[in-house]
Image: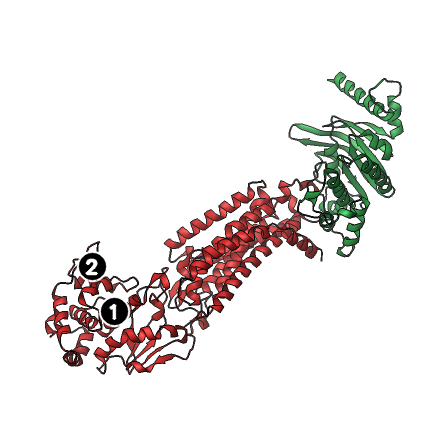
Chain colours: A red, B green
């Protein structure tokens, strides 16, 4: 009851609300607004602001500064004697002050994120919100408040707030720098290490993996507990039992943070994200069931997750001319279905190709791994180019490599038949987001004449063979593929065997 | 005896702030007079259990403040107004007093009534909802006194309580002191000799960290009679006479 009354006074007279308008403005301009340029998926929009840690960057330094201001209050105001002459332990009084500061900060974070999510929901984003990232952010903000408050208590001065805010900002800068450079190991624990956060189909085709967020929550909670417990160590903080308890709690907090760092170091790549064996729940690996939406009118049925419904026309239009070239052939796909994008350790999941599997063969399209129009400035034309390129590559049987010269030539001929002239193909192979084989293909097609200014001219034997194949009437080309496609896909054809 | 101090000293580095003070006092108002740097504030801080003595022994309210449990119990029954009163500018008068009532571990149910009573006693009832930053220096001092008396303390320590109060408020405050002294031990450190004459039943004069006089205000007045000591009032002349004697004694020893 007494603690509640103390907390009520501290909540009413806390300085945190004064800084919230500034944080709100920053949140709007830095976290929300840039995210709206991304495609309308929860995972993409929130990766921009939460996955990359922008929401924490917007809050953290200011929260640390205000918390330091509150922590230094007694020292700045000359309240030491007055407070020391009361029976309640200094630590308990400080806990009330910090508690109010942390409640304001965390509540504001949750409120701002809540409003942003409500706006996203009204915009009809596909997928589901990343609740684990929200929990990480709220815990991180709490940890910033604890660290700032402790700094203010131990170094009370009028500069405490500015110094703590600058320290928080510096920590964020270092965290970002380290995070961008590390795709594994202890650095995954850092709040702005987005390398652990980009999971293209999370919340759509499979759940967000909670492993890394749980480790981060343990890390920040441990830091917060340790920082607050350190306040109970000085002789003036309270009685001997309380100080011993504070020491134990501080050690426990530090141990928790250390354990979380160790756990992050054990993370390994899984298809849906970073897996921490000690924290992993196999249920998180299950694909989310859905009823596909299909376009049966394209000759070859094209089906997608309902979340990607808006891309169905583009996908069907892009694949129609390629699939028409091989329609009815043995081993050629008789339908198109969406496959889950697999996790990439980097910021952007690049380089995933299409697959052909099953009987009858199904062309698997990892649409979530592609640069969808709107995301990172991509256009519909670029998506079409990527889809056709990936399709001819897998149809030619080139797999995850550059393929044989014959396979490269057939690819080029099929692309030309689908509407991409030879002269434009080198440019198409430089599209951002293609697997690494694209560059090797480019080299073969232009016979090593790549320059820093561009891909160079189309030349050489691969180009010549591709031109011969493309020059055949469509029916003749289809007949040739009917005979040779299995051998081509097996890598047994040479350039000379092309017509 | 609520206060028993025996040969207490306190050093801050090379500075001897209090040099072997012994005092005893029970209920009533006890005045502590002395020039700047005499050691009054340090003695009060030790009595408030804010700083421990370097040597000597203290018993406050029958307990030894050297042990944590006793110190905590003393603090529950203590009221303290420091010389330099810090305050939280954003708090209202009522919140400030309530805050210290809660830090003094008063039962939560008693706090609202005790806060209202303390604020009324210092005549700040009309300003209970005013932010501290809007108050004058005298009003702030009264808010400080309100927080000191909110727990109805058995030992009340007031360091320069009338500094900044206007003459009318000082008269009201002296009445309050006399009233509090009926039930509690009130130790008042002050420069203002007339406060002692008007409100105190006992008085001690400190100089250079030592008590150089201990008696009633009448005894102090008697010390000044016929000495030709400086002062406008008899008590002031007694105070001046005691100080002059102490200084000449110190000079003779050195």
Quarter in which the N terminus of chain B is drawn: top right
Q: Quadrant of residue B145?
A: top right
Q: Residue at x 17, y 77 (%)?
A: A487
Q: Report the Cα–Cα distance between label 1 and label 2.
A: 16 Å
- Residue B190, relative to residue A184: is it above or below? above
- Residue A403, relative to residue A329: is it above or below? above
Q: Which residue is mark 2?
A: A455
Q: Residue at x 28, y 64 (%)?
A: A434
Badge 2 crowding class, 10 Å Cα cut-off, few under 14, some 14 to 19, many 20 or more, is many
Q: Nearer the viewer, residue A131 or A178?
A: A131
Do pointers 1 and 2 mark residues of a single chain? yes
Q: Quadrant of residue A294?
A: bottom left
Disc 2 chain ID: A
Q: Quadrant of residue A43?
A: bottom left
Q: Which residue is mark 1?
A: A389
Horizontal arrangement in the rendering, residue A489 relative to residue B217 (left or right): left
Q: Earlier in the sequence, mark 1 or mark 2?
A: 1
Q: Residue at x 58, y 45 (%)?
A: A69
Q: Secondary structure at mark 1?
A: helix
């Amino acid at each position: 009851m007494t603690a509640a009354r103390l907390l009520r006074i501290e909540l009413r007279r806390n300085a945190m609300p004064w800084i919230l308008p500034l944080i709100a403005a920053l949140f709007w301009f830095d976290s929300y607004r840039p995210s709206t340029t991304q495609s309308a998926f929860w995972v993409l929009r929130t990766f921009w602001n939460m996955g990359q840690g922008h929401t924490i960057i917007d809050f953290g330094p200011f929260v640390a500064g205000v918390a330091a201001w509150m922590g230094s209050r007694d020292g700045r105001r000359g309240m030491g004697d007055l407070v020391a002459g009361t029976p309640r332990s200094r630590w308990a009084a400080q806990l009330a002050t910090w508690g109010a500061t942390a409640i304001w900060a965390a509540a504001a974070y949750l409120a701002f994120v809540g409003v942003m999510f409500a706006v996203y929901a009204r915009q009809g984003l596909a997928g589901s919100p990343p609740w684990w990232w929200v929990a990480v952010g709220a815990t991180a903000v709490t940890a910033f408040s604890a660290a700032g408050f402790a700094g203010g208590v131990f170094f009370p001065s009028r500069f405490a707030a500015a110094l703590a805010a600058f320290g928080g900002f510096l920590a964020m800068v270092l965290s970002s720098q380290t995070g961008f450079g590390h795709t594994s190991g202890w650095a995954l624990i850092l709040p702005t290490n987005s390398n652990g956060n980009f999971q293209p189909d999370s919340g759509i085709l499979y759940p967000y993996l909670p492993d890394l967020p749980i480790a981060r929550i343990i890390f920040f909670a441990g830091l917060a507990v340790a920082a607050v417990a350190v306040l109970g160590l000085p002789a003036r903080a309270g009685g001997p039992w309380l100080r011993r308890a504070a020491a134990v709690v501080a050690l426990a907090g530090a141990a928790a943070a250390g354990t979380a760092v160790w756990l992050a170091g054990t993370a390994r790549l899984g298809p849906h994200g970073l897996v921490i064996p000690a924290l992993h729940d196999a249920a998180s690996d299950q694909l989310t069931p859905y009823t596909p939406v299909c376009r049966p009118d394209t000759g070859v049925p094209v089906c997608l997750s309902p979340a990607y419904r808006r891309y169905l026309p583009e996908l069907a239009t892009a694949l129609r001319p390629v699939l028409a070239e091989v329609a009815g052939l043995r081993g050629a796909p008789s339908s198109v279905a969406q496959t889950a994008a697999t996790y990439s350790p980097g910021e952007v999941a690049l380089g995933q190709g299409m697959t052909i599997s099953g009987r009858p063969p199904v062309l698997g399209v990892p649409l979530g791994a592609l640069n969808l129009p709107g995301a990172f400035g991509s256009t519909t034309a670029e998506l079409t180019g990527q889809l056709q390129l990936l399709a001819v590559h897998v149809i030619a049987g080139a797999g995850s490599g550059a393929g044989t010269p014959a396979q490269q030539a057939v690819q080029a001929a099929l692309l030309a038949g689908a509407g991409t002239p030879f002269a434009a193909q080198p440019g198409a192979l430089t599209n951002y987001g293609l697997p690494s084989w694209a560059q090797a293909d480019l080299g073969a097609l232009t016979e090593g004449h790549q320059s820093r200014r561009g891909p160079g001219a189309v030349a050489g034997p691969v180009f010549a063979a591709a031109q011969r194949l493309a020059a055949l009437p469509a029916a003749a080309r289809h007949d040739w593929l009917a005979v040779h496609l299995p051998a081509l896909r097996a890598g047994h054809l040479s350039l000379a065997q092309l017509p | 005896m609520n206060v028993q101090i025996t040969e207490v000293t306190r050093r801050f580095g090379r500075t001897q702030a209090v040099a072997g003070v012994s005092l005893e006092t029970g209920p009533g108002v006890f005045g502590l007079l002395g020039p700047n740097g005499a050691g009054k504030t340090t003695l009060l801080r030790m009595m408030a259990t804010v700083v421990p003595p370097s040597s000597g022994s203290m018993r406050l309210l029958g307990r030894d403040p050297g042990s944590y449990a006793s110190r905590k119990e003393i603090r529950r029954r203590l009221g303290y107004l420091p010389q330099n009163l810090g305050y939280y500018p954003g708090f209202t008068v009522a919140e400030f007093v309530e805050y210290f009532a809660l830090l003094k571990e008063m039962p939560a149910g008693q706090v609202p009534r005790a806060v209202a009573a303390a604020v009324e006693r210092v005549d700040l009832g009309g300003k209970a909802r005013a932010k501290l930053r809007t108050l004058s220096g005298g009003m702030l001092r009264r808010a400080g006194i309100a927080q000191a008396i909110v727990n109805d303390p058995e030992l009340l320590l007031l360091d320069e309580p009338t500094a900044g109060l206007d003459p009318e408020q000082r008269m009201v405050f002296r009445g309050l002191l006399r009233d509090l002294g009926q039930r509690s031990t009130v130790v008042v450190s002050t420069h203002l000799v007339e406060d002692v004459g008007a409100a105190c039943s006992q008085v001690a004069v400190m100089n250079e960290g030592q008590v150089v006089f201990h008696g009633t205000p009448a005894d102090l007045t008697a010390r000044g009679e016929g000495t030709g000591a400086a002062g406008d009032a008899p008590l002031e002349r007694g105070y001046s006479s005691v100080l002059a004697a102490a200084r000449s004694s110190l000079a003779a020893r050195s």
